[in-house]
Amino acid sequence: MATIDPAAALNQPAAFGLQDFMKILLTQLTYQDPLKPMDNQQFMSQIAQFTTLEQSQQLNDKIDRLLAIQSATQSIGLIGKTVDVNGQSGPFSGVVTALSLSTADPQLTVRTSDGTFVTGIALGQVVSVH
């Protein structure tokens, strides 16, 4: 009788959920050899392993949300500050004039010394803050 390996599930897309686990478990129970039934300890071990995996996925989701909030908060603090940016056409400096939170990552708008507005700057492109 094959067992479910939760470590292998980590390498799979996050689409594997509780309903999928229950289907697999019921299939195992349906087709098990009546002369060699699944060991109770093995059964409980699989449930415990899946529970641990599910909790790990939830923790990762919460950490991702926390990082997004932290990124947005950090971006708000840059409004009005002079920043050095590694842009697509080379490095430049300017004052952060606006912030867009409409995408997954905050996007800054920077006004350069010649009055040009550069939009769509990610936090990762900011090299230094003055």
Image (spheres, rainbow, N blue to C red):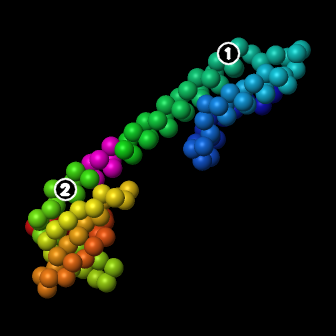
- Identify the mark nearer the N-term, 1 or 2: 1
Task: Tell me what residue is drawn at x 67 percent, y 34 percent.
Answer: 20
Task: Tell me what residue is drawn at x 62 percent, y 23 percent.
Answer: 47
Quadrant of residue 74 within the rendered picture: bottom left
In the picture of the structure, the residue carrying the numbered disc 1 is 41
**In the rendered image, the vertical position of residue 41 relative to residue 86, given as above or below:** above
Mark 2 and mark 1 in contact (Cβ < 8 Å)? no
2 horizontally vs 61: left or right: right
Residue 111, x across and y down, in percent? 17, 76
Task: Tell me what residue is drawn at x 30 percent, y 57 percent.
Answer: 101
- Residue 68 magenta-highlighted: yes
Residue 82, x across and y down, in percent? 12, 70
- Residue 9 magenta-highlighted: no
Residue 62 makes an appearance in the image: yes
Q: How far apart are marks 1 and 2 (CA)?
A: 53 Å
The magenta stretch spans which residues?
66-71
